[in-house]
Amino acid sequence: MKDFKFKLLLILLFVHSGIIYGQSQKKVDIEQAKFLEFNEQIVANAQRLIGDVILRHNNVRMWCDSAYSYTNANIVDAFGNVHILKDDTLHLYADFINYDGDLKWAKARGHVKLINKTTTLTTDSMDFDMEQSIGYYDNHGTIVDSTNTLTSLIGEYYSDLDKAYFKTDVKAVTEDYTLTSDTLIYYTETGIASIVGPTMINDEENTLYAEDGFYNSRNGEVELYKNPLINTPEQNIKADSIFYNRETGDGLAIGNADIHDIENKMIVRGNKIEYNDQTETALVTDSAHFLLYSEKDTLFLHADTLKTIPDTILDEKLILAYYKVKFFRESMQGKCDSMVYWSKDSTVQLYKSPVIWSGNNQMTADYIEMITQSDGPDLVKMESQAFIVAMEDSTKFNQIKGRDMLGYIRNNELFKIDVDGNGQSIYYARDKKGIIGLNKAESSNIQIFLEESKVKKIAFITSPEGQLLPLFSVLDDETTLPGFVWYDQIRPKRVEDIFREISLPVEKKAENELTKPEIKSELQ
């Protein structure tokens, strides 16, 4: 009795599993054909269907000119104008399709075309998984949607997800740009391309490159993450990450960011740069760094904040540097609180306690302006409380003080200084044997001539008053003019020093407000 019950249970389980298998592996049904042939000598175990053939399998319907339906397998070979409709939305066309009803798998060959809503995929050979709604090709394919045409050697198309995966020789073409890549994921519904390999995007003027990120082909928004670059005719941009909108021109470069202005030979660097390539503006707020290069040398500058804006003159720029400004050039160094650089004539304006060093000379004033001239010596204008100090040795300093001063630079050396108003000077007089005394003089206007950063001659223009004191009779308080401070401890002596935090000496003179109203508005 027990054996009988056990055998009955096995029979029931077998019958039940067979029913389930039969339900899941539904036979491909023949709905229509003009002729039906069966010839074992031509094709074994196959029915030949000819003329206006219609087949059905689950949610798939197929049309073709002729077909073989196999009696020993749930497989159909369809020939001529083959058309598959899946879920009443997806259309697959080909010259030939091998359809496996058990695997729910279609092998399409010859003039293959897949249409899903507004997306069309064409290739010469494709396999399509009917259950997962995924198409595969490995011998060049093209996908066209409402805005893009994309091609690749290898590809996968996920029709339910409106997603395409492209591999090898990837190219996308629109009216506005051309994209080339090694690997790309594209969402046909949104027009967003996911960059997962070396990718270049070109329009008429600009080139974008990255190895990771996203690109929205509909509105031009870009997120570039791995080795990103943006090159335009005017500038090159690189950073750890770049975010950019092609329509608005707004961009954000994060981490080791670098904007190179090719026309004006300027480079702006920082860890965060906000820019707009339409308005040609940029704002650097983290580790701001500015380079101005020429064939002769390079100016390196650091400040808390840098801003570039266009000048009223075409293709010219203004560079605004805010707070704790320090710069280094082989021939000249400096510091101030705020600075403006004009690219049109290379004029530099320094505000709030500026200090400039050139060789052994130190220049200070409430406001300093450096002017580059093509047809004459470069100029240094010092306005209000102008003061020049030249180190004679570690304990002796030549000093010139006045209301305003004008310095002349030739071959990167200060060779002449004009003092205008309230001129005072202290300098060590020399003969062939050495220093012979301390010369103290006052004159409304003074001219000083230098050679190799040392005073060679002083000319007192109006009513000089002065005396030459022997060194042995000079008291300590007679060796300096009022307001004298030697700022050597804060001088940038190499490029790295512009990033070094430095404190001014206690004797530092009080800061003054900006004295140039036309520039003040630019700095606000």
Image (cartoon, rainbow, N blue to C red):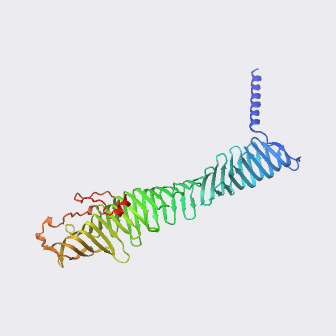
From the top left corner, tell me how far across and down residue 256 is, in percent: 44, 57
Q: Is residue 492 visible?
A: no
Q: Say if 490 sits above or below 390 in the image.
A: above
The quadrant the C terminus occupies is bottom left
Q: Nearer the viewer, residue 73 or 214?
A: 214
Q: Residue furthest front?
A: 517
Q: Say if 26 sits above or below 233 in the image.
A: above
Q: Quadrant of residue 425?
A: bottom left
Q: Residue furthest bottom?
A: 432
Q: Quadrant of residue 289?
A: bottom left
Q: Nearer the viewer, residue 402 or 47?
A: 402
At 24% from the left and 71% from the top, the residue drawn is 420
Q: How many marks?
A: 0
The quadrant the N terminus occupies is top right
From the top left corner, tell me how far across and down residue 322 is, in percent: 36, 58
Q: Is residue 340 visible?
A: yes
Q: Nearer the viewer, residue 243 or 48?
A: 243
From the top left corner, tell me how far across and down residue 255 is, in percent: 45, 55
- Asked whether, in this view, residue 155 is left or right of residue 308, the answer is right
Q: Residue furthest top?
A: 1
- Asked whether, in this view, residue 92 is left or right of residue 394, the answer is right
From the top left corner, tell me how far across and down residue 88 is, in percent: 73, 44
At 27% from the left and 61% from the top, the residue drawn is 489
- Asked whether, in this view, residue 249 is left or right of residue 187, the answer is left
- Asked whether, in this view, residue 41 is left or right of residue 394, the answer is right
